[in-house]
Image (cartoon, helix red, strand yellow):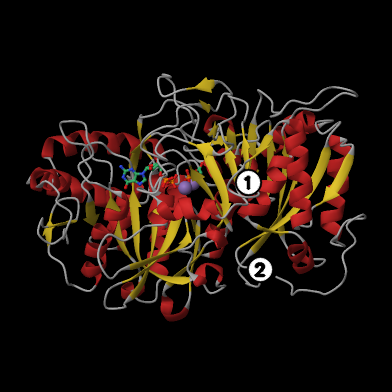
């Protein structure tokens, strides 16, 4: 990164003299033919102006509270990530692997050039410069998103460091990821706009070779806020492969124990499986403090002492609203109470506030639901869309750790992988070693959620919780994880790996484990394992807590429920092995690392005598 310059920036001609960037903006203007170009400076005046435009168009309603906050309703068909329309356009199909849709980069460019031709007619084109990671870090990365959506421009200013400070630091030669976004709804002269313009046809396309992203047809966060999934995971994972680091779908959490030991952990769960909640955990054990560093993405690099250090590249939370309330996630509620937030597809209360399922036990008597219809507690459908979201700045989070903005990042002691499994997978399992941990992560599985379009509740493998986000071949990605372990200058410096499941259900269909703040009890066990201070049973899957090794003080949990949450059942595991075999078969013999195949064989051997 180049250092900050103090030159005054001229926003009428563009605040940059970066030749490559200027050339690209000129090309996009010529192709997409917007009425106007605005270079975003990230100021509060700009926020006020753009949110006013959105209010005028009927996209936003300004809320009575929290302050400076807006409720937004999307097109009902543009509410989630579109995995079937997401492409990795590596030079060869084998570069994308079996977990990605692939199209030849030349063919995709041809298709998208026609989609984008004239796509911004009648609209304003915004040029948003952003920085993933702390502004003055050598390891942060720049991106520029060109978009014709005011919603995207204002959301990006919450989710990433944007504006003048970024333009200055980019100088004339910084490397940056190009992200081109259009909602795909050009306006002819005099044509009335709609509150949520978008197109039925959608393309979320990634070109790892040139580090560019073309996103067409959707305004939904995960498809359109290109710093997040598209850059910080898909493109960054390919940069990380080339440069020896990791770009992962992980929260980062700081924990201080009653004896004042500070530990940092990272945890990867698929979308809508508990990252944001764990990142803002409210401890239920006395004497503990939990502080938030990141809730969705971690960039991990080796640092001092050969340890893995994690940085959160983002500056905001794009959290699942339903299920968020003072009981489950009070710190998220306090963060959004600070205002400056955007709520998408939630319900509107009669006094101009927001509501969603799980915010309060009792629903208000009357609401306008996410489709714009009257809603009462008797209405059969949900008031908020299950993937409705709040978008809010990290700096308002009362539990934000000061380190969230530290260029050095934080040293990670443990990595947790987890999924949403109603059966089979125990509450927590400790991997035998790094290789075994990579194996457990490679077979991670979860029931699908509303974060992506498609059927909810379908079991699928979601390796490292990265299935929709790995920017290259999953077999090479596994090898990269194994190599990271081999590269560590001491195995003891590597984080310990754990596999968790907060979502196992008993015969009555209820969750066996209370979850949320109580998850600290599980993490406490894991941290004591690192220090050799907790008992465990050696099982075929890994080390599982003995039922009296978890600190259950004051919990009043049914003992049978706990036993059930911790068991490994042979019949369930036999079924699981079939699914793992099928999953590994899709990866292909020449790409699945031998070490992982060997781990699977050892698991089979251990299970055969269990
Ligand atoms: P993320 O998308 O991975 O960040 O997941 P969130 O933290 O936003 O949680 C997604 C959904 O799972 C929300 O509805 C939460 O209320 C719910 N959830 C989160 N943590 C737990 C937990 O420990 N137990 C249970 N039962 N539900 C949880
Ligand atoms: P999530 O992030 O993981 O918090 O759900 C958004 C997404 O993955 O679409
Ligand atoms: Mn996510
Ligand atoms: Mn989240």
Q: Which sits in the foreground, 124 or 55? A: 55
Residue beneath label 2, please?
135
The picture quadrant where one finds residue 498 is: bottom left
Indicate left or right for 442 with 398 as reference: left
Tell me, for residue 142, which label it has, or none: none
Q: Which sits in the foreground, 106 or 423? A: 423
The residue carrying pointer 1 sits among few (fewer than 14), some (14 to 19) or many (20 or more) residues within 10 Å by Cα, namely: many
> How far apart are labels 2 and 1 at the CA level?
26 Å
Tell me, for residue 69, which label it has, or none: 1
Expressed as whole percent of the image width and height from the top left, the position of residue 603 reads 19, 48
Mark 1 falls on what kind of element? loop
- How many numbered marks have been drawn onto this rendered protein structure? 2
Q: Which sits in the foreground, 86 or 280? A: 280
Indicate left or right for 40 with 223 as reference: right
> Outermost residue toward the bottom?
305
Mark 2 near ligand 3 (CB under 8 Å)? no
Instruction: Give the residue displayed 8% in from the left and 44% down from the top.
Output: 560
Instruction: Give the residue displayed 24% in from the left and 59% down from the top.
Output: 521
Indicate left or right for 494 with 550 as reference: right
The residue carrying pointer 2 sits among few (fewer than 14), some (14 to 19) or many (20 or more) residues within 10 Å by Cα, namely: many
Instruction: Give the residue displayed 21% in from the left and 31% down from the top.
Output: 509
Expressed as whole percent of the image width and height from the top left, the position of residue 317 reads 53, 52
């Amino acid at each position: 990164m180049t250092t900050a310059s103090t030159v005054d920036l001229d926003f009428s001609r563009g605040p940059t003299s970066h030749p490559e960037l200027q050339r690209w903006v000129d090309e996009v203007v010529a192709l997409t033919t917007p009425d106007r170009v605005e270079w975003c400076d990230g100021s509060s005046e700009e926020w006020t102006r753009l949110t006013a435009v959105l209010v005028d168009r009927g996209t936003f309603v300004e809320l009575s509270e929290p302050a400076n906050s807006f409720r937004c309703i999307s097109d009902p068909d543009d509410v989630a990530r579109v995995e079937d329309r997401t492409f990795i356009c590596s030079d060869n199909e084998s570069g994308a692997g079996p977990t990605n849709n692939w199209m030849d980069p030349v063919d995709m460019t041809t298709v998208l050039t026609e989609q984008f031709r004239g796509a911004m007619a009648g609209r304003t084109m915004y040029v948003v410069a952003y920085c993933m990671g702390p502004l003055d870090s050598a390891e942060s990365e720049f991106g520029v998103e060109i978009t014709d959506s005011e919603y995207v421009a204002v959301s990006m200013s919450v989710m990433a460091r944007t504006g003048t400070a970024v333009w200055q630091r980019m100088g004339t030669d910084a490397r940056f990821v190009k992200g081109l976004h259009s909602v795909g709804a050009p306006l002819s002269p005099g044509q009335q706009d709609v509150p949520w313009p978008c197109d039925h046809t959608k393309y979320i396309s990634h070109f790892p070779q040139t580090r560019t992203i073309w996103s067409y047809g959707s305004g939904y966060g995960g498809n359109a806020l290109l710093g997040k999934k598209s850059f910080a995971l898909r493109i960054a994972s390919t940069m990380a492969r080339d440069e020896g680091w990791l770009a992962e779908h992980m929260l980062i959490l700081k924990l201080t124990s009653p004896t004042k030991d500070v530990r940092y952990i990272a945890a990867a769960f698929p979308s809508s499986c508990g990252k944001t909640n764990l990142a803002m955990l409210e401890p239920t054990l006395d004497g503990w403090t939990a502080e938030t560093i990141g809730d969705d993405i971690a960039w991990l690099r080796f640092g001092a002492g050969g340890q893995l250090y994690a940085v959160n590249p983002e500056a905001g939370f794009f959290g699942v609203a339903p299920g968020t309330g003072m009981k489950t996630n009070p710190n998220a509620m306090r963060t959004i109470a600070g205002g400056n937030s955007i709520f998408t597809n939630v319900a509107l209360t009669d006094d101009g506030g927001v509501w969603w399922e799980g915010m309060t036990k009792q629903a208000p008597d009357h609401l306008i639901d996410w489709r714009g219809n009257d809603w009462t507690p008797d209405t059969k459908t949900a008031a908020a869309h299950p993937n409705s979201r709040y978008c809010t700045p990290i700096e308002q989070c009362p539990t934000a750790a000061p380190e969230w903005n530290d260029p050095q990042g934080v040293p990670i002691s443990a990595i947790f992988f987890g999924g949403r499994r109603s059966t089979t997978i125990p509450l927590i399992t400790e991997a035998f070693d790094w290789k075994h941990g990579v194996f457990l992560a490679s077979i991670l599985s979860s029931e699908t959620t509303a974060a992506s379009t498609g059927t909810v509740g379908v079991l699928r493998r979601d390796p490292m919780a990265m299935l929709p986000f790995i920017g290259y071949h999953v077999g090479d990605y596994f090898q990269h994880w194994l190599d990271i372990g081999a590269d560590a200058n001491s195995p003891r410096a590597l984080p310990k790996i754990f596999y968790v499941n907060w979502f196992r259900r008993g015969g009555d269909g209820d969750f066996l484990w209370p979850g949320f703040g109580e998850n600290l009890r599980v993490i406490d066990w894991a941290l004591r394992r690192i220090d050799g201070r907790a008992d465990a049973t050696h099982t075929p899957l890994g080390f599982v807590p003995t039922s009296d090794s978890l600190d259950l003080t004051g919990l009043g949990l049914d003992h049978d429920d706990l036993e059930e949450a911790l068991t490994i059942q042979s019949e369930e595991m036999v079924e699981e092995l079939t699914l793992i075999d099928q999953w590994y078969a899709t990866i292909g013999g020449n790409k699945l690392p031998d070490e992982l195949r060997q781990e699977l064989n050892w698991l089979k051997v251990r299970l055969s005598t269990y």
